[in-house]
Amino acid sequence: MKILVLGSGAREHAIVLALTSAGADHEVLAAPGNAGIARDATLVDVDMMDPGAVTEYAQSQAVDLVVIGPEAPLVAGVADSLRERGIPVFGPGKQAAQLEGSKAFAKRIMENANVPTGRAAHTRTIDETAAALDEFGAPYVVKADGLAAGKGVIVTEDRAAALEHASTYLPHGPVLVEEFLSGPEVSLFFLSDGDTVRPLAPAQDFKRALDGDRGPNTGGMGAYSPLPWLTDGFGSVEAFVDEVTRTVAEPVIRELDRDGTPFIGLLYAGLILTEQGVRVIEFNARFGDPETQIVLPRLETPLAELLMASANGTLEDHAAPAFSDEVAVTVVLASEGYPAATVTGREISGLDEAEQVDGVHITHAATANQDGRLITTGGRVLNVVGTGSTFAEARERAYAAIGLIRLEGGQFRSDIAAAVATS
Ligand code: AMP
Ligand code: GLY
């Protein structure tokens, strides 16, 4: 197959690696890509945000399948445009992508589908917001309604800070005040062809910048999969996945279909396991980052087949995707100043040595080649992925490798998957 992957992060690099892994014989193109993706796919010059340009390109080059990585092209209608021309695409249309693009839309779908989520109020003024905060009590949770690049949510004990956060978003539309939910978080991905859903393996990401879950929220500083501790509450990881498939993914996909907006692509369920049961905190309409970087290396079923079956509406003919027993841990190397004031344009070296470490591979998030040097172009630069038969082994490998990489001011968390490696 000839496959075009849209996006430029480590998530897209992980997708490209899974599409080109041993035994697969696909021609993979990527736009815009990055320096790491360029080693494993052919970079092509097409604006991923322009539905017409992507469609023209895919048609003229006889692309068999387009895989959309990030949310922005989904919300811009790239999938709709491809589908109108009959080009298979993995990624929902503009309307269904509102599941991620609008928290109000997501809440309505969940309510109609009877999916367990936190109680919430949509408020339009500061007074309404204050009343909702007092009704739910501390800790306070306030969310912007639309895409906010990871900055839209505040969870705080400080009522004034909650109101201040609301006041920055209220001029642009309603905000969501939500009941505080407490418990471990799980990311679970589902492939959907609009009708049938197939789960991938659960993962956990680390959103805060600093060790011990301190510091500001980021796009994600690390992740691991699977989650052995799920066995405690659910009997087995499989039982947990089955429950979420039945109570969350299937009802949501059915509801979107009934709504006239079938969801073809990846449904990302962000979950909190509360004492009262599993609750949805958010949906995304695309693969998660950095979870994809540790879920896909464990996938044994060929990814291209699964994505094509989703795009073609034939997922029902495919068994549940199979995963290896190996565990995977990823540690993100970020630039100095990330996330507040990222310094870019610095040279990175030592990658060749790092990639020699047993069980390690590296996906690139924000890199470019400049005059024969590898330089940084953004906040999250690389994902160092360690695999192994135990978490202790996978961690040790990932940290040994990241220690060999040189980047001035580079930062990473030292506690990714630490808790699970000692248990
Ligand atoms: P979101 O952007 O919706 O994923 O939220 C970002 C983070 O805020 C989540 O990963 C949670 O850690 C936290 N969060 C969101 N909603 C809640 C909630 N209702 N209760 C507690 N924490 C929350
Ligand atoms: N890992 C969080 C996200 O992809 O949104």
Image: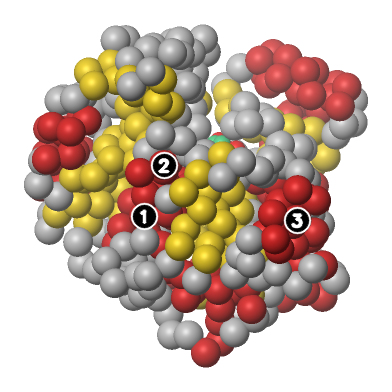
Q: Say what amino acid the circle numbered 2 marks.
A: Ala
Residue at x 68% of width, y 40% of height: 47
Q: Is residue 72 visible?
A: no
Residue 100 horizontal side relative to residue 248, left or right: right
What residue is disc 3 on? 56
- Upstream in the sequence, badge 2 or badge 1? 1
Ligand 1 resides in the quarter of the picture at top right
Viewer-nearest residue: 375 or 279: 375
Q: Say what amino acid the circle numbered 3 marks.
A: Glu
Residue at x 88% of width, y 22% of height: 171
Q: Is residue 81 visible?
A: yes
Residue contact at pointers 3 and 2, CB within 8 angstroms: no
> Relative to 396, is 29 above or below?
below
CA–CA distance in space, label 1 to label 3: 26 Å
CA–CA distance in space, label 2 to label 1: 11 Å
Residue 178: image quadrant is top right
Residue at x 18% of width, y 45% of height: 360
10 Å crowding of disc 3: few (<14), some (14-19), many (20+): some
Tag 1 secondary structure: helix
- Upstream in the sequence, badge 1 or badge 3? 1
Residue 406: image quadrant is top left
Residue 9 horizontal side relative to residue 314, left or right: left
Q: Say what amino acid the circle numbered 1 marks.
A: Leu
Please give the label number shown on residue 17: 1
CA–CA distance in space, label 3 to label 2: 22 Å
What residue is disc 2 on? 38
Does ligand 2 reach within 8 Å of label 3's beta carbon? no
Where in the figure is residue 226, as x and y percent of width and height?
30, 58
